[in-house]
Amino acid sequence: MEPITELISGPGKCFDIESPVLEALDYMRNGDIGAVLVSERGFPVGMFTERDVLLKLDFHDPGSMAGARLKDFMSGRLYTAGPEISCGDALVLMRDRGIRNLPIIGGGKVLGIVSLRDLLNHYSFHLERILDETVNALSSAIGQRDPYTADHQRRVSLISVAVAKRMGMEPSRINGLRMAALSHDVGKIDVPIELLSKPGRLSSVEFELIKQHPRAGYQILQSVDFEQPVAEMVLQHHERMDGSGYPRGLRGEEILTEARIMAIADVFEAIMSFRPYRPALGVDRAREEIVANRGGSFDPDAVDAFLALLDDPASGVLEGF
């Protein structure tokens, strides 16, 4: 976690308590900052924020701003912290005190101001990075048992993301789909390794064991606090539009769009790749399978987006095959 001084968004300049409000506002606008410190005889005594103007300005007499001084507009009690404060403790302090900006003071001088927005953005990025690392760790764990599955998940993720972008899906949902695709077969960690690498056809009993992996993956991922329903996507990636899929036999709109996209990428990648029980079947065979099931097993809009990418050499969907 970065030191809190790395999150400082405002300079350490102080305005004297007798300074004109318009001067401070002009400085804040030019520096694109939301708050400045107010000092008296060189010591910080308060803060002045854009919110203070909204709360205290007489909008019936805006001309009164011309002679206004910061002492008439600045916020109440000043809370500060040293550069050694952790980001977590800073958030707690700001929450408990109801403040949006926290001056950081060290070595007898103002180092700058950390805003609540900057802290929350930092935590959001940090948590997203942890989730990414968690997903990559799960994918690597599968790769230790079955290298085919590890490569399969990576390629399914690349294809799924490309299709979602083609369909105009929102970035946050695309990121959730990416993480789901990277871990969609993590439930195979519960499948006996001899079944994963069996060179011949599976018996009906063996196939029923394999079919449990979406539920196992869901159980592994459901406790992780993803922004998007990643665990549910993993649970649904073998569902089919016509109700012929598993494990719940969902139909049509009951299936998440992300899972519908993943289903196409999953089947395409499997047909295109070598497996212990058969050689790779090639792009023509894979295309034929996808087209034959458009509107049946597969979502027609997702199929159309996928086929458009398949016909575009620059799309990258055939990368790695």
Image (cartoon, rainbow, N blue to C red):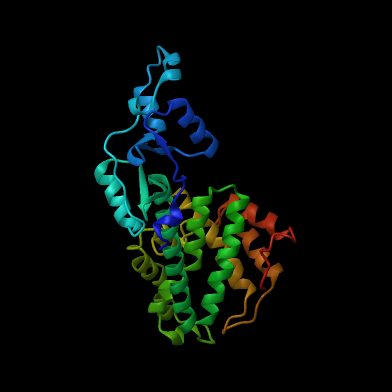
- State the image quarter where residue 281 is shown: bottom right
Residue at 51%, 38% in the rendered image: 32
Percent of width and height locating residue 132:
46, 65
Residue at 44%, 37% in the rendered image: 34
Q: Is residue 95 left or right of residue 60?
A: left
- State the image quarter where residue 223 is shown: bottom left
Residue 148, placed above or below residue 181: below
Residue 226, placed above or below residue 71: below
* Closer-to-camera residue (8/19): 19
Residue 265, placed above or below residue 109: below
Q: Is residue 220 left or right of residue 313?
A: left
On the question of residue 170 being in view, the answer is yes
Percent of width and height locating residue 318:
68, 67
* Closer-to-camera residue (6/190): 6
Percent of width and height locating residue 101:
37, 43
Residue at 37%, 50% in the rendered image: 104
Residue at 32%, 33% in the rendered image: 75
How many marks do you count on the picture?
A: 0
Q: Quadrant of the C terminus?
A: bottom right
On the question of residue 241 being in view, the answer is no
Q: Quadrant of the N terminus?
A: bottom left
Q: Is residue 159 left or right of residue 248?
A: right
* Closer-to-camera residue (272/115): 115
* Closer-to-camera residue (181/292): 181
User: Which residue, as the protein is rendered here, is positioned at the far top?
Assistant: 60
Percent of width and height locating residue 36:
42, 38
User: Which residue, as the protein is rendered here, is positioned at the far left?
Assistant: 96
Residue 158, placed above or below residue 104: below
